[in-house]
Amino acid sequence: MAKLGRTLRKTADELQRQIANLNAVVEVDAWDNKSGKEFRTRAKGNLKKLEAAFTRYDTAADAIGTSVTETGGSYADKLHAKYSNYASDLNRAQEIADAALREAQSAEDRKSAAQKSLDGHSGKKSDDADRKKAEGQRDAASAEVEAAREKIGEAKKIRDEAASRACDLIDAVVNHDSLKDGFWDSLAKDIADITESIAKWAGILSLLVGWIPVIGQALAGILGAVAMIATLINVAMTLIAVLRGNEDWSELGKAALGLLMVGVGKAFTIVAGKFAKIALSRLGKAAVATTSKQIARNGKKLNKIAGEKLRISKGDMLKALKEPFTEPFSKAAWANNLKALKPGSGNYKEAWGALKVRGNGNGWAGMPKSFSAADPGVASDLKSVKQASEALNFAAANKIAKKASVLSAIGTGITGAGYAIDTLL
């Protein structure tokens, strides 16, 4: 604690030096033009802030203490010594506690020895004097243990009172100077903290529920929209805090980076979704094909698609970066998702039926088979591609599904990291 006090004192001394330097500049009238007057006006405003900051550090250094003042003498001397500073009083309390612990340990040893002697007493009348002596030693030792406990209690009281005094001194300065955050500053910070947590957990949950058949995409859509709205509010509140000087620009950078990563993750998902839909379309045509020639043609087209590299185009990236700002505010998207999740819609029964199919009649067994690390918007299509390719025995379609799954999983990871960026950095 004394080391911390010295660090605070060093900062206070440096602030005092800078205040003196700035005062010297303010008092110079040689620069007597518009720029000089503007500079002196701004310098005077900064002087008040520096003086307030100095008072904070100066008060904290005095309250905590820059060195430990030893309190000699007996227990009574230490107990009734005058308040010095937190570091010194903490040391005084520790000395009392250490001494009390040694006394208690010594008394406990003597108590154990006396009790051992009593346990071995023969019960003969001739040994009564020895028994009474041992009882007296045991009782005296017990009283010493209790006295030691009381001393430790007093040490705790000294420690707590010293901490309370130091806190009161620091709080008195912090809560009443010009550097104290105003109502709007505190409100912006509170909103930023709350929306940050909402964005993180709603965003991560949106990525974890997409595997649920039928209703998963709707649930993920609502959670994702909530997460994105919270993220946008967080960025706005962080920007306000930065402009008012209450936050560092790095905090705004983290918020903006998280938003950017969500957009980049969406770009991977868009490309994965395109390939999944193309594969589903071809598989659908192959499923209704009536001739071997038609089946072969669809197989060739699937092989061609499977051989293509999955690239993120400029258009895909622009669409992905635009989505976080438009999708959460789409009335149609909210209406469709809420409709899909409406009780009695039949979607829950259909979802359970899909799980039972995947689990060979057991819905619970179908859950692990349904789970996917892919984005909720793609997961359902990828599962359908996999099932169709297995049924029709098209290796190319399965290859497309795997490539799209990897791409989507990468996108999901980037998106999840974007939501949890403040935790990661």
Image: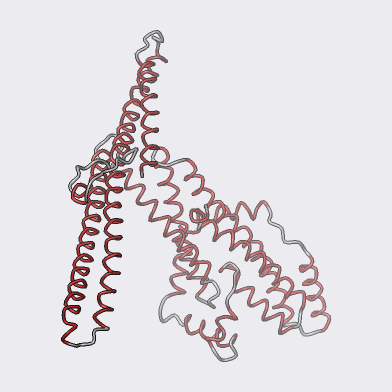
Choose between 316 and 178: the one closer to the eye.
178
Q: Position of residue 407 (x, y in %)?
A: 66, 64
Residue ID at (58%, 79%): 370
Q: Position of residue 323 (x, y in %)?
A: 54, 56
| Residue 29 position by quadrant | top left
Q: Quadrant of the N terminus?
A: top left
Residue ID at (70%, 69%): 278
What's the colour scheme?
Answer: secondary structure
- Residue 242 to residue 219: above or below: above
Q: Is residue 411 left or right of residue 106?
A: right
Q: Position of residue 351 (x, y in %)?
A: 51, 81
Residue ID at (47%, 74%): 340
Q: Position of residue 372 (x, y in %)?
A: 59, 73
- Residue 422 to residue 333: above or below: above
Choose between 349 and 117: the one closer to the eye.
117
| Residue 24 position by quadrant | top left
Residue furthest bottom in the image: 361
Residue furthest front in the image: 126
Q: Is residue 123 left or right of residue 252?
A: left
Q: Is residue 379 left or right of residue 68?
A: right
